[in-house]
Image (tube, grey):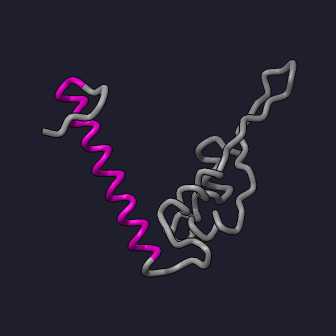
Amino acid sequence: KFQPTFVYTDDHVRAHYTICILSYLLDVTVTNRLRQKPIEGIGSVDKVHRILRGCEVGKLSVKGSDCSGLKLMPLTDEQKSVLKLFDCDYLVRRDFLRSIGVK
């Protein structure tokens, strides 16, 4: 029987199982896309995860005031390549970022 650790109710077990399946499907999708359109120097799902983990949005604020905002840190060429591979380069366009409150 499938029994995740620290998950006891049937609803939590089903949710945990669903997340595991979605994670597996995401890994398979990334692997297949890399096989279809290889990116030099990026040959594994783990490498894609490490590259995208470096994408950061920082919160900027002015001390002593209520002024604050979110800013996407500049992307590396590798990060841009991965986003383009999955047709997600729109995620870093100015109009999209502004629509979600990032400047």
Q: How many labels does the image show?
A: 0
Foreground residue, 64 or 11?
Answer: 11
View extreme (top): residue = 64
Foreground residue, 93 or 15?
Answer: 15
Q: Which residue range is magenta in the image?
A: 8-34
Picture layout, residue 82 above or below residue 65: below
Q: What percent of the width, then of the height, locates residue 14?
A: 21, 36
Q: What percent of the width, then of the height, locates residue 44?
A: 49, 67
* Dominant SS in magenta: helix
- Find residue 82 and report its image quarter: bottom right
65 sits left or right of 9 in the view: right
- Find residue 101 and report its image quarter: top right
Picture layout, residue 2 above or below residue 87: above
Q: Is residue 30 magenta?
A: yes
Q: Does the magenta stretch include residue 29?
A: yes
The residue sitting at 50% across, 59% down in the picture is 46
Foreground residue, 85 or 16?
Answer: 16
Q: What percent of the width, then of the height, locates residue 39?
A: 57, 77
The residue sitting at 61% across, 79% down in the picture is 40
Picture layout, residue 42 above or below residue 64: below
Which quarter of the figure is the N terminus placed in?
top left
The residue sitting at 65% across, 59% down in the picture is 93
